[in-house]
Image (tube, rainbow, N blue to C red):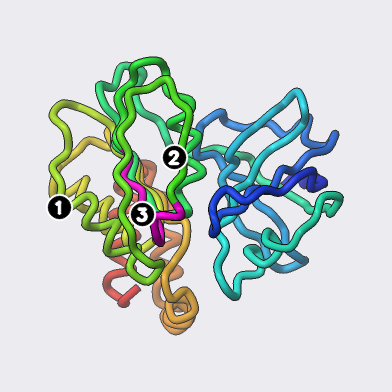
Amino acid sequence: MTAYRATVRNTAAITPLMRRVTLGGEALRDYEGSGLPDESCRIAFGADLTRNYTIRRRDPLRCEIDIDFVLHEGGVAATWAATVEPGAEITISGAPAGKYAPADDVPWRLLVGDATALPAIGRAVEELPAGAVARVIAIVDNPDERQTFDTSGDVTIEWVYAHSDEAGDALRAAIRDRDLPDGPGYTWVAGEAAATRDVRRHLRHTLGLPASHYDTIGYWRFDAEAWEQRYRQVSAVIDPRLAAADEIADDEQYFDAVDEIYIEVGL
């Protein structure tokens, strides 16, 4: 995997709990992306710690990218973002891809996510063609975390307030407790991993939507330490089954198989 050395050019507070770090450098001239609004890169915060982050803005001419960080206590990446100064260097890697893929003529888009999804939601909204209809349901800690987006689209934003330990339930409710708009639209949901897994099952199996009409992404996991401990306890049993699932060509059938494996062992 190709690594790119980048320099912090600027930092800015977007909200009290969201900080934008602008990375630049000649090395980024060759750092090509997918062009999708939820494309991400891997950032190395030391030899053994890397994390995926959405590329909020890409400027090929200036060889820059913006990364928005959610600030929270105890996180190595959050601490770095809160304290880093221009001139510091960091290594990024990965081949940015993304999953956001509505049809060009889709009549509506529904974008739902917690704070970690706001960089992708913001970019998606700002890149909407003129008149494109989108509804956003954004889950944040409090009213101070609301953001504004410049867009040519026809966009409505509903802000839901929930702390991080409640964000998963709020994400589930945002989909389960509301009717989708009429017609064959596109739903994109991102945030806490267990919640997005439940949302995917709801969209696929309860509502029966075709795979082309939705995408879900898990960005983080509530109580990750307990989850990882449980995984280690059952890894010898499930790892061979997960490896076998990798052979499933259809993405949604693959995720169904993985969900069943995890559910059986309490993950």
| Residue 202, horizontal then vertical, whole percent | 20, 52
Measured from the top left, where is residue 129 in percent x and y? 42, 17
Q: Residue at x 30, y 56 (%)?
A: 171
Magenta extent? 136-145
Q: Amino acid at mark 2?
A: Ile
User: Residue 139, labelled with which disc?
Assistant: 3
Q: Nearer the viewer, residue 165 or 208?
A: 165
Residue 106's quadrant in the figure?
Answer: top left
3 or 2: mark nearer the eye: 3
Whether residue 102 is visible, yes or no, is yes
Query: Badge 1: few (under 14), some or many (20 or more) residues near its Cα, within 10 Å?
Result: few
Q: Residues within 10 Å of mark 2 (few under 14, many from 20)?
A: many
Q: Which mark is residue 177?
A: 1
Disc 3 residue type (three-letter): Ile
Say which residue label 2 marks: 121
As displayed, is residue 180 above or below residue 21? above
First reached walking from the N terminus: tag 3 or tag 2? 2
Q: Indicate the secondary structure of the residue bearing disc 3.
A: strand
Question: Percent x, y for residue 39?
Answer: 55, 39
Picture layout, residue 234 above or below residue 244? below
Which of marks 1 and 2 precedes in the sequence? 2
How far apart are the alpha carbons under marks 2 and 1? 21 Å
Work out how far the residue at label 3 is from the one at label 2, CA to CA, in angstroms: 12 Å
Foreground residue, 201 or 190? 190
Q: Does 116 sit left or right of 169 as displayed?
A: right
